[in-house]
Amino acid sequence: MTSTPLCFVVVKEATVPTQRPGALSAATLFLFAPPSTVTGRPHAKPVFSGTANLHTRPYPTIDQIIPRKYKELAMSETLLADAVQAYQSGNLASARNMLTEAVADYPEDARFHALLGVASGGLFEYDAAREALKKAVELDPDNSEYRTNYGRMLIYSGAFNEAEKQFRAAIALNPESPSAYYYLTQIVDLPAEDPAISALETIAEGPLGDEHKAMAKFALGKIFDRLGEYDAAFAHYQRANQLTPATYDHGAVTKFYDAFKQVFTRDFLESRRNGGNQTRDVIFIVGMPRSGSTLVEELLARHDGVAGLGERAEMARIVGAISRHHPQGYPAGAATMTDEHYRGFADKYLEEIKPRAQEASRYVDKNLRNFQHLGFIRTAFPKAPVIHTRRHPAAACLSAYFQFFQDEPSAFDFDNLAARYAAYQDLMQYWESVFPEPLHTIDYEDVVKDRDATVKQLRNIAGIADDASQDMDEAAKRDIITSSAWQVRQPVYDQAINHWRNYEKHLGPLFEAFERHGVKLPD
């Protein structure tokens, strides 16, 4: 009597659209196959193995049991499931690497190209994202989700006409797709008689979930705002925000900010001002969303020597790693680190972003949330310029209220917006009081009123010569990754400063919240 290993491989169903017909079920088992015959690929993982007494029964191979095409299909499903899991857990680099391998092995499977495009976009690799999503659309032109994601990446590059084609094609394929309508309304001024309005109203009142209804309402708000029907626009925006669950925890935010103040004191920062990496080549833009940061970055990037890199995630990953691995967490653990540690963090950061700057001698990181981490940033980069973009609190908060900011939990409620804004103001005031090197504050209103003066000021801050001509079309030559990607490529008018006043009669609760939370308003 002999013992033969029994290996079970479970192939999970993919959680992405248009799963191939005939795919093996979630409980498909490869029986009677030794691990070596089913784990030739690194992503085909045995999830259970045991031993069974099979007497002298011969060992059949996988090819004898299952036709080759089904074996390949099972392998592709396993790889897809692993990539989806990596993506959903936030491990975008791992997902990207798996999917790069997958598109080489399964070049005709649109799902791999589509997910590769989304993962690449999450890693700020937008050329690769567009290439992958374009291929997905070519392979599966009837998939509305692929077209919507491809159109979204086209927006970032300024290819608005092609993006509009993709969104309209997605709508034709799936008239109940709120995301396609939503992104279409971000780049196209739709007339009052456009059928999109009635379609969006149907979606908003239909059986879809609250997230889809909210997206439809945000789109309707944008349409009516551009039509100048501000009461109708506000009603749609208000309903959109009501449909979005409020998850903001103000107590946790203020506790987090107080912890920064305990670690990054004036004495601590003064003692570290000669450590870290002393470069001035990296420029940080910080502030609240919708504060004019994209416009400021764009004005800087119109100089040949400056690369605008958008909202980088490298600094967040560094402090996230400290939070996970340091015994005291973050920011408390930052107090125990040496200059050598901070220099290592700075060098790692530069190593990751420099290749994206290509030939530029300066590079701009516009991750606004870095205002929270300015103590850490100033310790790692004591000489790096920090530009704080600022806007009238009512304008900034209302503009955020009008956006479908899924990653900004305070944006869906006036009280939360005001509380968050007050906490931001307090922390920025603290940083300004303790930093040896000054912060540079740029008010959005000043940028609009006198762009030329702002450009000179920005170039002085960045330490670059004010001798390069400004190419007003330069914005079309690089990716602008923000909800205002379309707006920043349009002419800037004085009306933009006071657009929020069109809604002033609806903003009593917002100003009451400002007073309640101590938000400082300009004179």
Image (cartoon, grey):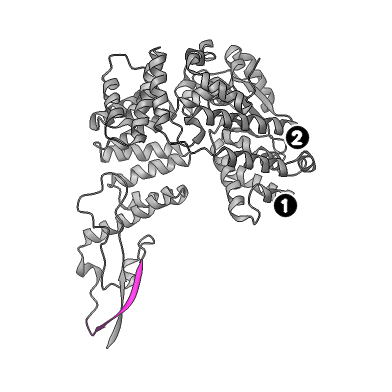
Mark 1 — residue? Answer: 336
- Labels 2 and 1 touching (C-beta < 8 A): no
Which residue type carries mark 2? Val
129 relative to 504, above or below = below
Which SS does the magenta portion mostly show? strand
Visible residue check, residue 467: no
In the rendered image, residue 4, in percent from the top left (x then y), is placed at 30, 80
Residue displayed at 64% across by 48% down: 330
Q: Which residues are magenta?
A: 47-57
Residue displayed at 64% across by 55% down: 326
Q: Is residue 51 magenta?
A: yes
Would you say 499 lies left or right of 456 here?
A: left
In the rendered image, residue 373, in percent from the top left (x then y), is placed at 64, 39
Quarter of the image containing the C terminus?
Answer: top right
Mark 2 — residue? Answer: 434
Q: Could you tell me how far apart the alpha carbons at marks 2 and 1 are, in whole angstroms?
A: 19 Å
Would you say 141 lies left or right of 431 here?
A: left
Visible residue check, residue 90: yes
Toward which corner of the image does residue 28 lie, by quadrant?
Answer: bottom left
Q: Is residue 80 magenta?
A: no
Depth order, front residue of 355/480: 480
Q: Label 2's element?
A: helix
In the rendered image, residue 30, in percent from the top left (x then y), is placed at 26, 67
In the rendered image, residue 214, in percent from the top left (x then y), is placed at 37, 30
Which residue type carries mark 1? Thr
Toward which corner of the image does residue 195 lie, by quadrant?
Answer: top left
